[in-house]
Amino acid sequence: MKKFYFLILILFFVPCHVFSEEIFLSLKKNKVNVRYGPSFDSPIKFVYKKINLPIKQIDKKENWRRIIDLKNNSGWIHRSQLKPANSVISLNEKILFKEPSNFSKPLAKIQKGRILLIQKCIDRWCKIRSDKFKGWIKTNNIWGSIN
């Protein structure tokens, strides 16, 4: 009987929530439907039209991922439309450098909101590609995963 009460106490005081791991992903296609629920029968809420857009997975159900974007839009996307994170968004203007150093040659000014494709990261710097530019940026003030 003591074991039963002990078990009840543990279940009562210890939360038994199972949360999906929050991870960053990127859109695989140029057109991705975001749905109200985790089913092809669920109506389309909105459509993303930007390949490599970084999004955050906040839940999952079978082959569906509940996501949220930089502007707090959320919905469900089928996992076939997603890939591991390979991009970030600049949250403010940044300088693109030739090497990972403030003393390196500046190459371009990166505008706020630009999608940057990550090639590799070292310390607090990432080598990125954006349109015709390649170079290094500091990893502060970006939205997405650099891992």
Image: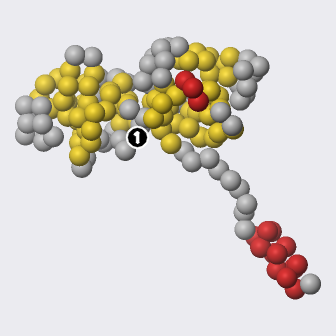
Looking at the picture, how far across and down is residue 44, in whole percent?
Answer: 68, 17
How many residues crowd around disc 1 within 10 Å: few (fewer than 14), some, or many (20 or more)? many
Q: Element under label 1?
A: loop
Residue shown at the point (72%, 20%) measured from the top left: 40
The image shows a total of numbered marks equal to 1
Looking at the rendered structure, the kind of residue marked 1 is: Ser
Q: Quadrant of residue 57?
A: top right
Looking at the picture, how far across and down is residue 85, in whole percent?
Answer: 43, 35
The residue beneath circle 1 is 145
- Residue at the limit of the structure toward the right, as seen here: 1
Asked whether the viewer can see residue 25, the reply is yes
Relative placement, left or right, of 91 versus 67 is: left
Residue shown at the point (18%, 30%) measured from the top left: 135
Asked whether the viewer can see residue 71, the reply is no
- Residue at the limit of the structure toward the bottom, as seen here: 2
Looking at the picture, how far across and down is residue 120, in whole percent?
Answer: 27, 38
Q: Quadrant of residue 10?
A: bottom right
Quarter holding the N terminus is bottom right
Looking at the picture, how far across and down is residue 101, in whole percent?
Answer: 13, 42
Residue shown at the point (20%, 25%) measured from the top left: 134
Quarter holding the C terminus is top left
How are the colours assigned in the image? secondary structure
Give above or below for 14 relative to 81. below
Relative placement, left or right, of 145 versus 14 is: left
